[in-house]
Image (cartoon, rainbow, N blue to C red):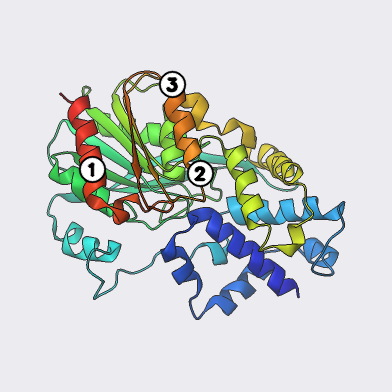
Amino acid sequence: MKKGMFFCLAVCSLFFINGSNAQATEDFSLDNREEIINDFEEELSEAEENIIQGTTLSEQEAPSIVANLMFRVIFESDIPIMNLFDDLKIKENPEIDSVDWYVKNWYEKLENTSDRTITTTETYRKENGEEVSNPITLRGRYIDNGSDKTVILHHGYRALKYELIKQAKFFSEEGFNVLLISSRAVNGSDGKYITFGYYEKDDLNMWINDEVNRTNSDQKIVLMGVSMGASTTVLSQNVPHPNVVAYIEDCGYADLHEEMLQAFSWFSELLPIIKNVDFKQLVNQISQRTESRLGFSIDQISPIESAKNTDVPKLFIHGGADDFIPISHMEDMYNASPGYKEKLVVDGAIHGKSFDTNPEIYTEGLRHFLNNVFQ
């Protein structure tokens, strides 16, 4: 009975990661899911398990208990059921045009690649209020084309390490240096908590500084991200970096508070335990936990407010069939942004799949934008 509830919560959070991402649902149906679910249950505190007695909760109990569970599942990195993408090995015989195919048949054959690292600090509070501060190492992979232009690619939430390999190939063939970063707490980078761009935005600016220091003071930086990575890209330029000449935002959220309300409402039919929960109350309770434990509130993660602060050229991309992060998020950010801007809607594309859905339209859009930026 409890296992079913935890399974639903995990499914909810897994879809929160990737929306309609087919790869996510395929991986979630792995034969070892029973073992993964058992591992996940062990992560829950005895207090939470003792309180939950059935498939429904009272109006007083539900928001607090669900908020505790969702805080852990969504923000903590070390949740086994949520780490299905960590350290996945490249398949020996991948399908043509798959991520693994591009890694094996393009990236691994390059002779101008290297690993990159930067070091920063992660600070948070334990449940007992004790503050913890640890150095963490963040990792990336670099393609050196000896260019005065570098693109930094930021993947989505708990995404595959090489999620943006197709974009990397495009930019490399356009003559850019390419830096594929792994955000904190996933894909080989250290850390305990994922913060939906709040601290990742500072990490991204550190990556920019590192690249400028390694190349030259006039290095031209283009930022690009997908989903959470897109929102992080926008947040990072709340105070514009002098070397950033453009950024590309692909299917990010304009405001995390609003996106969480939409996501929980979307999942309410899957989760009987929260059908009577006030979603505004739930998000507020999760926000109380992020504020006390991680040092920020959900309301502070609002890329649209950052987009208003810079006239750096911007390209906004969104899938026309994205029902996870509605296209209205893109439209709102586009309309709020000053300076030169373009937008690209890929018809029929679900969340995060615009490149795969129509590579020709996608790359034409990128090339048109870049030509205008660098003319």
Mark 2, residue position: 326
Is residue 61 visible in this depiction of the protein? yes
- Find residue 187 and report its horizontal and vertical position in percent: 41, 56
Mark 1 surroundings within 10 Å by alpha-carbon count, few (fewer than 14), some (14 through 19), many (20 or more): many
Disc 2 on helix, strand or loop?
Answer: loop
Looking at numbered disc 1 in the image, what kind of residue is underneath it?
Val
Marked residue nearer the N-terminal end (3 or 2): 3
The residue lying at 24 percent from left, 76 percent from top is 93
The residue lying at 14 percent from left, 60 percent from top is 109
Mark 3 surroundings within 10 Å by alpha-carbon count, few (fewer than 14), some (14 through 19), many (20 or more): few
Q: Quadrant of the C terminus?
A: top left
Disc 3 on helix, strand or loop?
Answer: loop
For the residues labelled 1 and 3, the Cα–Cα distance comes to: 23 Å
Mark 2 surroundings within 10 Å by alpha-carbon count, few (fewer than 14), some (14 through 19), many (20 or more): many
For the residues labelled 3 and 2, the Cα–Cα distance comes to: 26 Å
- Find residue 115 and report its horizontal and vertical position in percent: 27, 50
Above or below residue 119? Residue 25 is below
Q: Quadrant of the N terminus?
A: bottom right
Marked residue nearer the N-terminal end (2 or 1): 1
Looking at numbered disc 3 in the image, what kind of residue is underneath it?
Val
Mark 3, residue position: 239
Do the CB atoms of the residues marked 1 and 3 lie less than 8 Å apart?
Answer: no
The residue lying at 46 percent from left, 21 percent from top is 308
Do the CB atoms of the residues marked 2 and 1 lie less than 8 Å apart?
Answer: no
Quadrant of the rendered structure where residue 36 is?
bottom right
* Label annotation for residue 178: 1
The residue lying at 50 percent from left, 70 percent from top is 28
Is residue 143 visible in this depiction of the protein? no
Looking at numbered disc 2 in the image, what kind of residue is underneath it?
Pro
